[in-house]
Amino acid sequence: KVAGNVSRTNGQFDWNLTGSVENWKPVPFLTVEELDVKLDRVGISFSTTTAIAGVADVHLVGDFCFSEKTYRITADAATDWPVIDGVELTGVRFTVANRAAANCAAGDAAGPTRVTARADLDLFGTHFIVSANITGDGESWIAAQPMGAFQPIPGLTIHDTLIVANTYE
């Protein structure tokens, strides 16, 4: 399915083209039931909800801005993701981008590629909010904040803590 629009306002032309692709299998572990794509003078964008590597209902959105040569791809899964026995991730969100803004914006120059992630994690009977960041040059950090008291071993309770690991010098 493809549709388009051309308009002229005050002597300025604007246009867009939208399309939908069904049952696309770009790689063996991913089947996209329906992919919506939009192309206009600013850039190209897409969105879909699919299953990736056995995780259902992963929502993917992304875009590429022509003039700034910036991109952003985000994947989020509201579903439970049992990583290993006893470790459960929920509210998982990954972003790969070379700009800070969520949408194409004039003047938002391309920077280094950065991968960010966020998830809710249940581990050792404690609920954590976990965030991570990896840059294109390999520098990274991960932080985990327990929601409430954290008891890693019986008899040792830690309150108001933030656990951080990084590769910065």
Image (cartoon, rainbow, N blue to C red):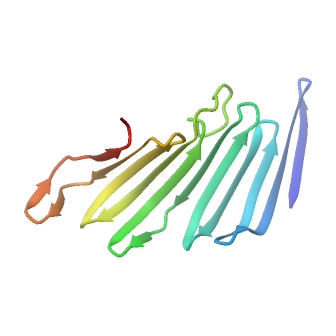
Determine the residue positioned at 82% across, 52% down.
18
Residue 42 x %, y %: 77, 36
Residue 57 x %, y %: 57, 67
Determine the residue positioned at 38% across, 73% down.
84
Residue 156 in the figure: left or right of residue 137? left
What is the quadrant of residue 128 in the picture? bottom left
Q: In which quarter of the image is the C terminus?
A: top left
Residue 20 in the figure: left or right of residue 56? right
Does residue 141 lie above or below 76 as drawn? above
Comparing 81 with 132, the one in front is: 132
Determine the residue positioned at 16% across, 50% down.
159
**Going by the picture, which residue comes out furthest to the front?**
169
Residue 8 in the figure: left or right of residue 164? right
Residue 34 x %, y %: 73, 66
Residue 64 x %, y %: 71, 42
- Numbered marks: total: 0
**Going by the picture, which residue comes out furthest to the left?**
155
What is the quadrant of residue 12 in the picture? top right
Q: Quadrant of the N terminus?
A: bottom right
Does residue 67 lie above or below 1 as drawn? above
